[in-house]
Amino acid sequence: MGLTRNRRKTEPEIVIARDTDSESSASEEEEEEDYPLSESEKEDEAVKIELEKSKAKGKAPITVKLKKVCKVCKQPGHEAGFKGATYIDCPMKPCFLCKMPGHTTMSCPHRVVTDHGILPTSHRNTKNPIDFVFKRQLQPRIPPIKLPYVIPDQVHCAVIRYHSRRVTCLEFHPTRNNILLSGDKKGQIGVWDFAKVYEKSVYGNIHSVQVNNMRFSPTNDDMVYSASSDGKIGYTDLETGTSSTLLNLNPNGWQGPTTWNMLYGLDINSDKGLVLAADNFGLLHMIDHRSNSVTGEPILIHKKGSKVVGLDCNPVHPDLLLSCGNDHFARIWDMRKLQPGESLNDLAHKRVVNSAYFSPSSGTKILTTSQDNRIRVWDSIFGNLDLPSREIVHSHDFNRHLTPFKAEWDPKDASESLIVVGRYISENYNGAALHPIDFIDSSNGQLVAEVMDPNITTITPVNKLHPRDDVLASGSSRSLFIWRPQEKTEVVEEKKEKKIVICYGDSNKKGKKQKRGSDDEDDDDDMFSSKGKNIKSQGKTSKSTRKKKT
């Protein structure tokens, strides 16, 4: 039950004396009625008494009222945004979650139901013989029966304030299961052995600004390629930390923002021996990883002047390349005939596309994440791709300096349906505002599980599932967390010691200069929690995961 206020709080007033002389108003000559004054009225009366002398000289005051102004629509009289774990909508704007008018974010039908909502399209039977042939070849890769999902729902170990700036990308080692690579906004690359926890190192001599993507070399698993906003492709030895630059798009240094090149999308085509990288002008660059030299000329694959933030080669048909960018499109290309405007399919979105991936096993599905709070799924790349098979409503549109949210497949899921993505809108869990990590069944849009920890009050946009083990790595602000499934046989009374390392490096130093070529201008350490006060959870949290029955 809500509480009803008996009296509305008066708005603050500022009284300013006017410089020019004027006649006193007739209202000032009227006699005032005798009535008790409120506290705010007494304060106003005191201010008026102090200015009585200026009034006597004929200077009439000007009264200016300070009204609350909404940061969303810039209109006075109301506020919008987060109040603790509650999001207050702007009455002039639609729902922040589904972007539709007629309801608030807290009462959004995609929020109050058991799943995050799904907008299915009509079933399309293309009757295409090529579609039939490919389905016959690739369908056996997907088992007809889904196995129970294994959800990493408990923090096993962590490194707090590991990086000096926020984490931007994660990558697991291809052969050593306990090695995790992380890149940050400052250009550093961290190598962490989370099995031993304390064995960690950070290389800061590779890039000067944000690391956007990393990929391991297909021929040497101790070498890693990295794409950065400094316009360079780095090739780093993880054992020694030595690095070489394979591609530098800014050889003359900073010449202004209109000519500064930044590299975002990165992937490796092992069959063709190519390292593929895309920049912020819509161009695709290619490097021969056998000779580590640039090959061919850059090719325009997206709208000129737009960022290409994602590249993904098909795991079964390497000639197929999937790209996405800020021009609101995800595009499928044939590597054998890469020409501007010659894409096989253009998948339209309403806003910026943060990521686009083929399914990891069969390569027949496509998963995209867009800034319109939609996760889109195409069940088959063969046939009509004008509309997605499903649109899942999910909160990942943000208005802060954050690493973009990206929904990713679980590489261990044989049914190619489980995806993981961080959530932007916070939830109220026992009085604490937490931002869960969501596990969603992409085949029906159902929320399988939402995992959280009462000690993690920051937003977690970067998440990576292990390709072989039941492990989830997440990057939240400057910290790294490793999640594992909670053991069923664990006795309630026994408490397992969590291995958490707190790093105190040069990340605490302030007053550092902003690097050129970075994506945003936030000079803070991005160690923010949800708006409102950080409330320490009182008592013991019985469960750190809410699972939904399928």
Image: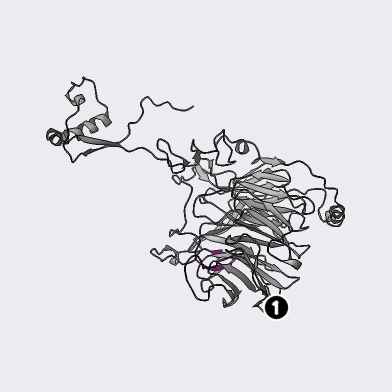
| Disc 1 residue type (three-letter) | Arg
Residue 506: % across, % down: 43, 67
Q: In the image as oriented, which residue stretches furthest toward the bottom? A: 291
Q: Which residue is mark 1?
A: 290
Q: Which of the 4 quarters of the picture holds residue 4?
A: top left
User: Considering the numbered disc 1 on the image, is that residue within a helix, a strand or a loop?
Assistant: loop
Q: Which residues are magenta?
A: 183-196
Q: Is residue 250 above or below residue 280?
A: below
Residue 327: % across, % down: 61, 55
Residue 21: % across, % down: 16, 37
- Camera-side residue: 422 or 494? 422
Q: Is residue 341 above or below residue 26?
A: below
Near mark 1 (Cα within 10 A), the count class, few <14, some 14-19 or many ≥20, is few
- Camera-side residue: 273 or 485? 273
- Seen at 59% across and 68% down, the residue is 227
Residue 117: % across, % down: 65, 40
Q: In this orientation, does residue 100 appear? A: yes
Is 106 included in the stretch rendered in magenta?
Answer: no
Left or right of 512: which side holds 104?
A: right
- Quadrant location, the C terminus: top right
